[in-house]
Image (cartoon, rainbow, N blue to C red):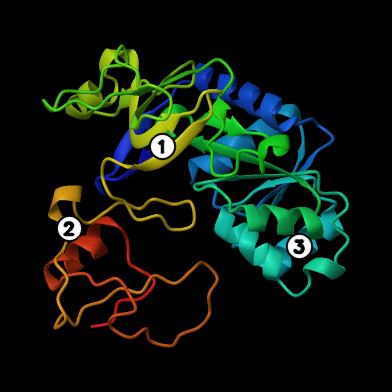
Amino acid sequence: MYTSGTTGRPKGVVHTHRSKLFHNAMMHQAMGLTREDVGLSVAPLNHTAELHTSFLPRLQVGATQVLQRRFDAGEAWDLVETERVTHFFAAPTMVGMLLNHPDTERRDLSSLRLVEYGGASMAPHLIREWDRKIGAGLVQVYGTTEMGPCMSVLYPQEQLSHAGSAGLPSLGHDLVVARLRDDGEPTDPSQPCEPGEVGEVLVRGPCMMRGYLNRPDANAHALAHGWYHTGDLGSLDEDGYLWIRDRIDYMINSGAETPGSPCRQDRRPPRSDGCQDRCPLRSHGQQDQSHTRIGQTPLIARSYRHSIRRRAGRPSRLDV
C-alpha cells in the first residue's frame, strides 16, 4: 500500500500475509468483532485505517459488510438504522459531523455498539456529547501504514480518563519513546526517555512492514535498529500511556488523511502581508463556498503552489 507520510513522495509499503493476519487478530481483540457484527464502511477502502482496522478484520470473522460510496452523515445514519449496523470506523471530523446532523437524535441507533476512530485524538466535550446522544463505545487507534497500521489503542473505559492520549501499545507490540540525536543518525531505542520526556516514538512487532518497495535509502532510516521510526514526537506517562506531542516533519492533516507537506520543517514558507496566494482548507463536508479573507487563513507562498498541487493533491480551495 502506498503512503506519502510527511515527505509528500509516495512510498510503497510492503506487508506480508502473516502480518495482515496478525493485524486482523489484533483488531478482533481490540474491537471484540464476531460474525454477528454488521460493519459499515464510511471511509475509503484505499486507506489503511478503513481497510486494515475495520473491513478486513470483519471480513475474516464473517461479519456482514455495508459499503457507503461517499461519506454523508445523513446517509450513514440511515444505513446504521436500516441495516442495524454495530460497528464502523470514522475520523474525528466525521464523528463531529454525525453528531451535528439534524437527524441524529430522532434515529434508532440502538444497534450500534462500537465506533473506532483514529487520525487524531477526540476532545473530551465531543466524547461526552457522543455518550449523551449515541451511547455506543468509542475506541481510538493510533498508527501508520508501515505498522499495519495499529500501534496503540485507547479503549472505551479510558476515553475520558485519558482523553488526548494515544493509549497503550497494541497486542504483541513493543513501543518506546527514545531520545533524539544531534548527529543526524536514527534514534536509538536503547536510549529511552524518562516519563514525560519528549522523544521519537519507535515501535516493533509482528505487524511491522518488510520495508519500502525499492527504497533502501528510506529503509535504512525507517527500520534502523530493527524498530520502525515513526517520526512522531511523543512521551510516555508513568502508566505507559502514549501522548503524541508533535511531528519531526510538518504535515497536512485532512480528516485522518496525511497527504504530505509541501515543505520541510526548516523550510516553512514566509508570511507576507502582500501575499495574494492563499489556501483555505475547508473541513470535510463543509458546503460554504464563501471566500476566506487574507489574514484569516494560512498563507502559502506563490513558489509553493505547484508543489502543493503535485505532492499533496489539490487543496479544497486555492484562491489567487
Instruction: Kindly check if marks 2 and 3 are in contact, taking CB atoms under 8 A apart as contact.
Output: no
Q: Nearer the viewer, mark 1 or mark 3?
A: 3
Q: Residue at x 21, y 78 (%)?
A: 277
Between 173 and 14, the residue placed more toward the observer is 173
Which percent across, then down, holds residue 291? 38, 86
Amino acid beneath label 3: Trp
Between 44 and 244, the residue placed more toward the observer is 244
**Image vertical order of residue 283 relative to residue 136, above or below:** below
Amino acid beneath label 2: Arg
Q: Which mark is residue 77?
A: 3
- Report the Cα–Cα distance between label 2 and label 3: 41 Å
Residue pointed to by mark 2: 268
Left or right of 144, for residue 11 = left
- Report the Cα–Cα distance between label 1 and label 3: 30 Å
- Report the Cα–Cα distance between label 2 and label 1: 29 Å
Dot placed on the residue nearer the N-terminal end, 2 or 3: 3
Between 45 and 133, the residue placed more toward the observer is 133
